[in-house]
């Protein structure tokens, strides 16, 4: 474990990395585009389940939940894109 990463954050990344490993295995048979689409669908399905099971309905509207999930996804995607792709005009 990276000493700079708190234990709960490391656990989060360990879980995420297990999904990425599975996705890489599945992509060998199904291709990255299909696996990426399946992951998005599965994430939305599980996210909806987790939201409902959390007791959030009644305290948070579905529109608020959608805004929160979309904002979180956008932030994560921006972070990952910045790690993989150089900004335009960067010569990469």
Image (cartoon, rainbow, N blue to C red):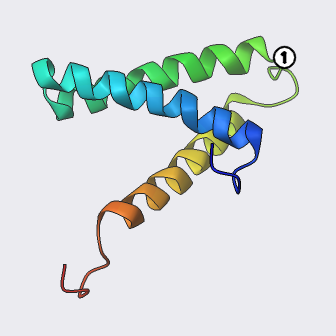
Residue drawn at x 57%, y 38% as measured from the top left = 13
Work out which quarter of the rendered image holds the N terminus and state it.
top right
Give x and y (percent) for residue 64. 71, 39
- Whether 46 is drawn above or below 77: the answer is above
- At a point 48% along the width and 60% down the height, the residue shown is 79
Q: Quadrant of residue 42?
A: top left
Residue 91 vertical position relative to residue 14 in the rendered view, above or below: below
Judge by depth and name the residue closer to the eye, 82 or 63: 82
* 14 vs 52, nearest the viewer: 14
- State the image coordinates of residue 54 (x, y, percent, origin top left): 80, 18
Label 1: state its secondary structure.
Answer: loop
Which quadrant of the figure contains the C terminus?
bottom left
Q: Which residue is drawn at 35% across and 27% down?
A: 21
Q: How many callouts does the rendering have?
A: 1
Q: In which quarter of the image is residue 26?
A: top left
Q: In this view, does 19 lie to the left or right of 3?
A: left
Is 58 situated left or right of 63 in this image? right
**Left or right: where does residue 56 sit relative to residue 35?**
right
Callout 1 environment at 10 Å: few (<14), some (14 to 19), or many (20+)?
A: few
Whether residue 40 is visible, yes or no, is no
Q: Where is residue 9 in the image (x, y as percent from the top left)?
A: 69, 42
Front in this rendered view, residue 7 or 64? 7
Left or right, 47 with respect to 31, comes to right
Q: Can residue 88 be seen in this view?
A: yes
When the figure is inspected, residue 33 is found, relative to residue 91, above or below; the finding is above
For label 1, the residue is: 55
């Amino acid at each position: 474990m990276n000493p700079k990463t708190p234990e709960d954050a490391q656990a989060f990344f360990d879980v995420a990395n297990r999904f990425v490993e599975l996705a890489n295995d599945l992509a060998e048979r199904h291709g990255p585009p299909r696996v990426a689409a399946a992951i998005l669908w599965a994430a939305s399905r599980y996210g909806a389940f987790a939201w409902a099971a959390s007791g959030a309905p009644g305290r948070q509207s579905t529109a608020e939940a959608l805004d929160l999930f979309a904002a979180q996804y956008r932030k994560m995607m921006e972070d990952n894109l910045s790690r993989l792709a150089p900004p335009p005009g960067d010569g990469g």
